[in-house]
């Protein structure tokens, strides 16, 4: 296990290296429109996807019942090829888009994170394909205690 | 400066599963404080990872990701001893990078 000091040093070294290499780490523009969207279709459109088509090869993992809406483990994965982005969306959140993962050859199309949910809602996993198709699967997650102080 | 991330990376069968626990408030901008004023949004917007210096993952997050976010992903072709480094950047421009060795 690294000490904190080592970690800091390594972090600084990595940052310096990246700066020197001109690595465009922050060239990625934050997709504000997609994250401010109030509906699933709006968010998908802002993220560059077309009409939503249900597809069982896009897999959403999540609990049936979340006891605590502040921490809901959600995962998205797929075996399809030609996937550009994988998105997790919660339909009844004030802003529906939770996270967007860029898929490339170096990582498996399988990501997991934890989300906040204000209330019970359908959760969508969406794969935006390189050709613009938006494939999704959804699942209802019941929340017994809201994630927004409710 | 935020606290260090906790990174665990384990290799198995030519792949490495990386689990990251970041330390961040992830304020949504929807919550009100005791005086009834909106607490401004403060959340991680961009997460990126590199494997032996080569970028492997980029993700964008919204405020709906839980406090002290957890992230799990799998790097192909990674083996024990390789370095993984994770960087996040929040909407206030704060950033943090941490590195771990795959075991």
Image (cartoon, coloured by chain):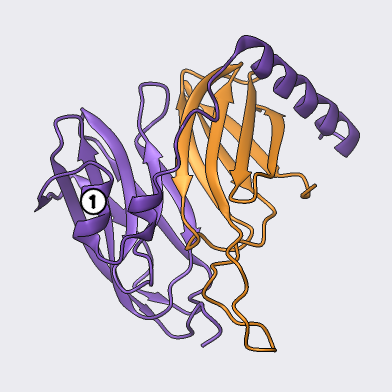
Near-viewer residue (B42 or B24)? B42
Which image quarter holds the N terminus of chain A?
A: top right
Q: Colour of chain A?
A: purple
Asked if residue A19 can be seen in this view, the reply is: yes
Label 1 sits on a secondary structure element that is: helix
Q: Is residue A82 left or right of residue B59?
A: left
Residue B90, image x, y percentages: 61, 48
- Whether B103 is drawn above or below B66: the answer is above
Please name the residue shown 36% across and 21% down the image.
A105
Residue A53, image x, y percentages: 9, 51
Q: Colour of chain B?
A: orange
Residue A60, image x, y percentages: 30, 55
Q: How many marks?
A: 1
- Give residue B31's quadrant in the image: bottom right
Residue A114, image x, y percentages: 49, 59
Q: Which residue is mark 1?
A: A44
- Give residue A134's quadrant in the image: top left
Q: Is residue A9 left or right of residue A39?
A: right
**Which chain is indicated by disc 1?**
A
Asked if residue A75 can be seen in this view, the reply is: no
- Whether A30 is drawn above or below B14: the answer is below
Circle 1 crowding by C-alpha within 10 Å: few under 14, some 14–19, many from 20:
many
- Whether A144 is drawn above or below A133: the answer is below
Please name the residue shown 52% across and 79% down the image.
A148
Q: Is residue A124 left or right of residue A116?
A: left
Please name the residue shown 22% across and 47% down the image.
A58
Please name the residue shown 53% across and 21% down the image.
A24
């Amino acid at each position: 296990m690294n000490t904190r000091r080592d970690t800091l040093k390594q972090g600084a070294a990595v940052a310096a290296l990246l700066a020197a290499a001109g690595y465009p780490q922050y060239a990625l523009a934050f997709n504000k429109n997609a994250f401010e969207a109030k509906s699933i279709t709006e968010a998908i459109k802002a993220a560059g996807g077309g009409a939503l088509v249900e597809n069982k090869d896009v897999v959403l993992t999540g609990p049936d019942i979340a006891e605590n809406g502040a921490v809901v483990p959600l995962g998205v994965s797929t075996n399809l090829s030609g996937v550009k982005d994988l998105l997790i969306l919660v339909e009844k959140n004030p802003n529906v888009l939770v996270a967007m993962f860029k898929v490339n050859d170096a990582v498996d199309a399988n990501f997991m994170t934890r989300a906040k949910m204000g209330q019970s809602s359908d959760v969508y996993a969406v794969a935006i394909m390189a050709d613009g198709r938006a494939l999704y699967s959804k699942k209802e997650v019941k929340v017994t205690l809201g994630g927004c102080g409710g | 400066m935020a606290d260090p991330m906790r990174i665990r990376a384990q290799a198995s069968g030519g792949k490495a599963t990386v689990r990251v626990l970041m330390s961040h408030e992830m304020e949504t901008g929807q919550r009100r404080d005791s005086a009834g004023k909106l607490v401004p949004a403060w959340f991680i917007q961009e997460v990126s990872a590199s494997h032996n210096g080569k970028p492997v993952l980029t993700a964008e997050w919204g405020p709906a990701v839980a406090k002290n976010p957890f992230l799990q992903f799998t790097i192909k072709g990674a083996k024990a001893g390789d370095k993984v480094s994770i960087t996040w950047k929040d909407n206030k421009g704060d950033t943090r990078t941490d590195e771990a060795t795959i075991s």
